[in-house]
Image: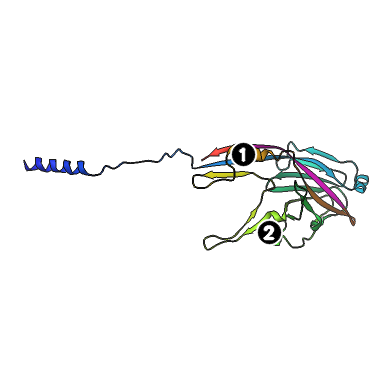
């Protein structure tokens, strides 16, 4: 009898206790949404001085179909230069076809953006911290190949650290937008994927230029490489 009364008492206490629920979050619900844009470029034209036309003959501009590193090239009797361009880097390979050394006086080089503004360039052999200092020329000996990168110097910034994080260098993309991330607790730049897509594709058809001065036998020839945005593809991903 006593055991039965104890069992009833336990049931009554349990029935009076507050109910508890095991709530499990939906692990499949996306936390963030990313909008991404991929830009496709072409080498549209190459301008050079009239004397270079007379001395170094006709020019060729074409696409490199079987090259895994470079996309297009320019060639005349003095040099062959291959290019690869994306929004974060401009790289090239220059082949000196002559019997003389070629110099690139970097302080005379320039990047001209889509709005016609000229920018000092920084090439791959220079530290970011020296981006405002004079740059010695690069020398390409006869019949040799030289590889390097160029980027507008004022698109590179130093971000100061804090008590919780170290400082770091950052590069601004040549064109925007390239990426926008929207999370539950933070908003992106664009209200919708449609707005992002429209902004990215508004860059189609824009051009920019890279001026490479090429010095040979004490004569500086300014080669201006004109690039064009041929297409922009966008996509949305949720994670």
Q: Is residue 222 magenta?
A: yes
Magenta-drawn stretch, dominant element (helix, strand or loop): strand
Residue 187, given in percent of the width and then of the height, sits at: 54, 46
Residue 126, given in percent of the width and then of the height, sits at: 72, 58
Residue 158, given in percent of the width and then of the height, sits at: 64, 59
Q: Is residue 212 magenta?
A: no
Dividing the image into 4 quarters, which one contains the N terminus?
A: top left
Residue that carries the numbered disc 2 in the rendered image: 128
> Which quarter of the picture shows residue 27?
top left
Q: Residues within 10 Å of mark 2 (few under 14, many from 20)?
A: some
Residue 45, given in percent of the width and then of the height, sits at: 82, 41
> Which quarter of the picture shows residue 157?
bottom right
Q: CA distance from mark 2 to mark 1?
A: 34 Å
Disc sitting over residue 195 in the figure: 1
> Which quarter of the picture shows residue 122?
bottom right
Identify which residue, 188 or 139, lies in the foreground: 188
**Tag 1, which secondary structure?**
helix
């Amino acid at each position: 009898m006593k055991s039965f009364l104890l069992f009833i008492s336990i049931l009554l206490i349990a029935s009076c206790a507050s109910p508890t629920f095991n709530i499990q979050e939906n692990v499949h619900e996306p936390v963030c949404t990313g909008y991404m844009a991929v830009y496709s470029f072409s080498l549209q034209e190459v301008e050079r001085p009239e004397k270079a036309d007379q001395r170094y003959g006709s020019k060729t501009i074409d696409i490199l179909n079987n090259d895994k590193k470079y996309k297009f090239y320019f060639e005349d009797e003095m040099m062959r230069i291959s290019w690869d361009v994306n929004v974060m880097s401009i790289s090239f390979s220059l082949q000196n076809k002559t019997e003389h050394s070629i110099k690139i006086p970097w302080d005379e080089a320039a990047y001209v953006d889509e709005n016609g503004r000229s920018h000092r360039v920084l090439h791959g052999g220079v530290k970011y911290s020296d981006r405002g200092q004079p740059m010695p020329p690069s020398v390409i000996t006869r019949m040799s190949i030289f590889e390097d990168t160029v980027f507008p110097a004022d698109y590179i910034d130093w971000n100061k650290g804090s008590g919780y994080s170290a400082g770091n260098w950052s590069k601004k993309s040549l064109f925007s937008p390239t990426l926008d991330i929207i999370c539950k607790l933070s908003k992106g730049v664009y209200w919708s994927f449609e707005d992002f897509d429209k902004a990215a594709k508004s860059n189609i058809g824009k051009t920019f230029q890279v001026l490479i001065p090429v010095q040979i036998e004490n004569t500086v020839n300014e080669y201006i490489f004109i690039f064009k945005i041929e297409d922009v593809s966008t996509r949305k991903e949720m994670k």
